[in-house]
């Protein structure tokens, strides 16, 4: 009986140490969780896909209506419109969309000019300067939501799975040997 308790303690210690080391290693080498992938539609109809956007870059569903209303106010009276005079929720929405506009301006083709005005069919008249701003964003669609914390960890916790399987194998082996030894002892 003392021998069985000794082996049980060895199996407990070994399986716990192996599992904790495997989980710690997986936590250390875990890649950062990506943000959501979004598709931004601009006022001129162009669409910009953005990946790995920060989690706070996408606002609640009703925020687009607020931005559209603020963009109309800005277009009607540009001199009197100030972001500082807005309520905190509107300022936060404008800041969020300004950050998205900054991110869009880093995408090639969206940095300085917009589509050309045409003087007729297929004849460009001139290029109009078109810098993406918060008021030119018309729609933000989430293409792929960010993965959950535990889902992301479990998808990348390869060593933890192997150490858990090893710990289970140790316990199965322990109880199998105990059953075999007790079978011989009973005779």
Image (spheres, rainbow, N blue to C red):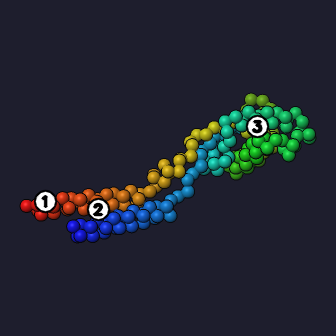
| Point 23% across, 70% down: residue | 3
Which mark sits nearer the N-terminus, 1 or 3? Answer: 3
Secondary element type, mark 1: helix
> Label 1, label 3: how many angstroms apart (C-alpha)?
77 Å
Residue 155 position in % (x across, y down): 45, 52
Front residue of 115/171: it is: 171
Q: Nearer the viewer, mark 1 or mark 2?
A: 1
Residue 109 position in % (x across, y down): 70, 46
Q: From this viewpoint, which residue is outermost toward the front? A: 1
Question: Horizontally, is 42 left or right of 38 in the view?
Answer: right
- Residue 21 is tagged as none
Residue on which the image places disc 2: 170
> Label 1, label 2: how many angstroms apart (C-alpha)?
20 Å
Which mark sits nearer the N-terminus, 1 or 2? Answer: 2
Location of residue 6 (image quadrant): bottom left
Residue on which the image places disc 3: 67
- Residue 183 is tagged as 1
> Label 2, label 3: how many angstroms apart (C-alpha)?
60 Å
Q: Nearer the viewer, mark 2 or mark 3?
A: 2
């Amino acid at each position: 009986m003392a021998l069985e308790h000794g082996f049980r303690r060895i199996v407990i210690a070994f399986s716990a140490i192996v599992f904790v080391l495997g989980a710690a290693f997986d936590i250390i080498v875990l890649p950062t969780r990506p943000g959501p992938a979004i598709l931004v539609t601009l006022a001129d109809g162009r669409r910009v896909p953005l990946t790995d956007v920060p989690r706070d870059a996408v606002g609640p569903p009703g925020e687009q209506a607020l931005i559209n209303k603020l963009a109309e106010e800005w277009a009607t009276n540009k001199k009197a419109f100030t972001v500082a005079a807005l309520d905190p929720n509107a300022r936060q929405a404008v800041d969020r969309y300004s950050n998205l506009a900054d991110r869009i301006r880093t995408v090639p083709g969206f940095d300085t000019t917009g589509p050309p005005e045409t003087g007729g069919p297929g004849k460009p008249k001139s290029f109009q300067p078109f810098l993406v701003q918060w008021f030119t964003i018309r729609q933000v669609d989430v293409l792929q939501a960010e993965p959950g914390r535990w889902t992301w960890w479990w998808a990348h916790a390869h060593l933890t799975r192997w150490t858990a399987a090893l710990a289970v194998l140790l316990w199965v082996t322990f109880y199998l040997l105990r059953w075999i030894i007790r079978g011989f002892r009973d005779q």
